[in-house]
Structure formats: structure tokens, C-alpha cells
Image (cartoon, rainbow, N blue to C red):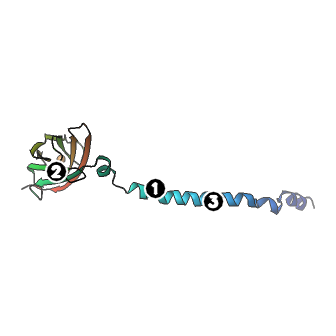
Amino acid sequence: MPFSIALSRQTPPERSLEVPSTWRVPRLWLLTAVVAVAGLIPTAGCRSPENAASGITVTWEVDPDPPRTGTAIVTVVLDDTLGRPVDGARVTVEGTMTHPGMAPTVAEGVEVSAGRYEARIDLSMAGDWVLLLNATMADGRSLQREKSLRGVRDP
Ligand SMILES: [Cu+2]
């Protein structure tokens, strides 16, 4: 019967479906390597780079606390790795809201005592704010930090 002959010719031999055993071992190694590398990535990402990189600790204080609309006194305290105040820095604090379409407000920090800088920020609207610190040290190094200031309320 011509039909059955044609069908048997089209059926491929079973051996061709097998993956050669020399292939399987490298693929298993590759998979192991990918899993190992993927496991390392989050560990590297979790390190806090900013403090370590600059060696300067930033402590924020916002008055009033909890924050209200109107003028807020934002104080940043800069310390070095040994806990000594970092004086003579040029400090600005910028306040932005988390929604688009509002101009940021920027204030210069005044050094009220060694390593302690005060900026007066006008929190003009209730809601969630973000404070951005920009500091340039006396030796020229610069530092940027961010602090979220959520839930600013009308008095
Ligand atoms: Cu706003």
C-alpha cells in the first residue's frame, strides 16, 4: 500500500531526538553558574554605599515634628567617621513634592554651630515631600542625601 510506505519514511529515527550526552553536562554547569551569580547580585545591592563612600554621617532634624505646612527648620548635622563635626561646608536643602508640576523650594543652610546647618524651607502644601541635601565640604568633596518627609499637614 503506497500510503503506509510514505508514512513510515517520514517518521524520523528515534535516536535523532536525543540530546548528545556531551551537551547536557555543560548546560547543567551553565545553569548552576547563572543561579550562583543571580544569588550574589542582591547582596551587593544591599550595601549602603553613601555613608561608606564619603565617610560622613548625616543626621536630619525637622522642626516642627510632625511636619506642618509653613516654614520648617531643617537641620542637618554632619559628622565624620570619628564622630567629629564637619564644619565649613556649603549646604543647601531643596524641598520637592512627590507629585509633578510643583517648583522645588531651595534654602541655604546656615552653620549655627560646628557641623550643624539650619535651612528654612517653606512647605507650601500639605502632602508628601522629599528633602534633598547638597553639601560641599571645605576640602571640595560633595555629598548628596535624600530624606522623605511624608504626611505634611495643614496646622
Ligand atoms: Cu504640591
The residue located at (74%, 58%) in the rendering is 22
Image depth: mark 1 or mark 2 in front: 2
User: Does residue 19 appear in this view?
Assistant: no
Q: Nearer the viewer, residue 135 or 5?
A: 135
User: Does residue 94 appear in this view?
Assistant: yes
Query: Which of the image's four quarters has the C terminus?
Result: bottom left
Counting residues from the N terminus, which is met first, the one under dot 2 or under dot 3? 3
Residue type at numbered disc 2: Val
Inter-mark Cα distance, 3 to 1 = 19 Å
Query: Residue lying farthest left?
Result: 155
Inter-mark Cα distance, 1 to 2 = 33 Å
| Element on which disc 1 rests | helix
Q: Give how far across and how far down residue 91 sits, in percent.
A: 17, 41
Quarter of the rendering containing residue 64: bottom left
The residue located at (56%, 57%) in the rendering is 34
Residue type at numbered disc 3: Trp
Q: Give how far across and how far down residue 35 sits, in percent.
A: 54, 60
Q: Nearer the viewer, residue 127 or 107?
A: 107
What residue does disc 1 label?
A: 41
Residue type at numbered disc 1: Ile
Q: Which mark is residue 67?
A: none
Q: Residues within 10 Å of mark 3 (few under 14, many from 20)?
A: few
Query: Residue lying farthest top?
Result: 140
Q: Give how far across and how far down residue 145 sits, in percent.
A: 25, 47
Query: Would the CB of label 3 be found within 8 Å of ligand 1?
Result: no
Q: Which mark is residue 77?
A: 2
What residue does disc 3 label?
A: 29
| Element on which disc 2 rests | strand
Query: Which of the image's four quarters has the N terminus?
Result: bottom right
